[in-house]
Amino acid sequence: MIDTHAHLHFPQFDKDREEVIKECEQKLAAVVTVGCNIDDSINAVNLARKHHFIYASAGIHPHDASNYSLDIKDKLREILSDDKVVAVGEAGLDFYRNLSPKEKQEEIFRLQIELSREIGKPIIIHTREASHEMSEFIKKEMEGVKGIIHCFNGDTELLETALKNGFFISYAGPVTYPKNEALRETLKKVPSSRLLVETDSPYLSPQKKRGKRNQPTYVAYTVKTIADYLDLNFTDVDRITTVNAKRIFGLPMTKEESEPKLVYKVRNNLYINLTTKCPCNCVFCFRGKENYVLGYNLKLDREPIAEEYMYRIKNPGIYDEIVFCGYGEPFERFDTLIKVAKWAKKMGAKKIRVNTNGLVYLITGRENVLDEFKAVVDTFNVSLNASNPEEYYKVVRPSFGNGSFESVIKFIIDAKEKGFNVIISAVNIEGFNKEAFKSLARKLDVDYRIREQKIV
Ligand code: SF4
């Protein structure tokens, strides 16, 4: 786990800082201690220099903006040049407490945006009662700047703007508060590749520690809440947020974290990533935009042979399900898919599922393929995303053109008739007709899944 936003150098830790740091070293991969003005940033850097796993950021908080003018830029640049400094900030706008005049806050924020762009380190953004103004800044003045929305508050305009502009979203203790259901809801829209966690300690203790001083190790409570909400395991959210923190801050990554994955575990399922090829171009697909999914790099740079998958799967029987999925269409590698699936079944796989766009007949040019999967594959999850041809061609945009929708429907009917478990799935994009999709599922006599669209 990485606490991407703490203030370990603050006076609230003076009495027991070394003890807290020792506990952090045992339980966390890294902590970023965040500076709020020039002297405070120097304190943050000094602390980071003493501990290998602590990093610092340097910047001027909007509350402190009125104490500075534009001639602070050189000094701030000098602090930011330290190797242990991984980000600019915390910087931003706070129109709730208004401790600095609005224009002053904007001037000092602008200065830090320029520094972030110049030195290539991300900017950590604080925003309170200023979501609209911050969205405007992101749209108009932050092109080419990498950023993190710290302690995200749930504002949908800000979320949409930040994600569309490549920003990362960091959740803190408030996501654990029972009344914050609307904030938790936003988790469904954040791609796994942009999710971060933080404590903002010594402030904002999570629900289980409310009333006590917060500390970086309590980030685990936020990880647990997010895992429960997204129906993932704790280790999944731990991996996802750790890898993301390393990516945004440029921290060293292990080979395991950086290399493309052929197989990857999520919950107790093992996913098999066969290819990045797909004959479709779904409007919501982020293949080509994001290499990381659920904490794994899925951007294969080659097409591995079946034996490489078998070597990595090792013991298929220990997983709840083996799922052919990944970052492309599994049927694009028909021979490898069937070889690995047959081997996995023989080796004791409990269940095998293929997540597919259902265009196998057009991909292979054959219509008798299903018999080959009998007694091997249990479930086909067909990503259909539409209830009629018109909607399908608009959303899925298959390269085969006309006849594709009918071909997928035929595959679904055939698979159902041959005794496979079939699920049709869709992403709930704007204008999607849920009721029509449910009615199609009933007509085809198959289960359905509808998931929220992630913003990219
Ligand atoms: S079918 Fe899947 S991989 Fe292919 S474009 Fe659509 S979402 Fe992307």
Image: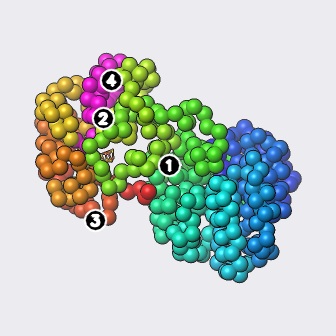
The amino acid type of the residue labelled 2 equals Pro
The CA span between labels 4 and 2 is 11 Å
Q: Is 284 displayed left or right of 5 in the figure?
A: left
- Colour approach in the figure: rainbow
Labels 2 and 1 touching (C-beta < 8 A): no
Q: Is residue 448 visible?
A: no
The CA span between labels 3 and 4 is 39 Å
Q: Circle 2 sits in a helix, a strand or a loop, which is it?
A: helix
Q: Which residue is the site of mark 1?
A: 193
The CA span between labels 1 and 4 is 28 Å
The CA span between labels 3 and 2 is 28 Å
Q: Which residue is the site of mark 4?
A: 340
How busy is the neighbourhood of tag 1: few (under 14 within 10 Å), some, or many (20 plus)?
Answer: many
Q: Please state which of the two labelled residues, at mark 3 or mark 2, is closer to the viewer.
A: 2
Labels 1 and 3 touching (C-beta < 8 A): no
Residue at image x 21%, y 37%?
Answer: 363
Q: Is residue 26 above or below residue 384?
A: above
Decide which of tag 3 and tag 2 comes sooner along the chain. Answer: 2
The amino acid type of the residue labelled 4 equals Val
Decide which of tag 3 and tag 4 comes sooner along the chain. Answer: 4
Q: Give coordinates of residue 399: x percent, y percent.
A: 23, 47
Q: Which residue is the site of mark 2?
A: 330
The CA span between labels 2 and 1 is 22 Å
Residue 381 image-quadrant placement: top left
Q: Over which residues does the magenta segment extend? A: 330-358
The image quadrant where one finds the C terminus is bottom left
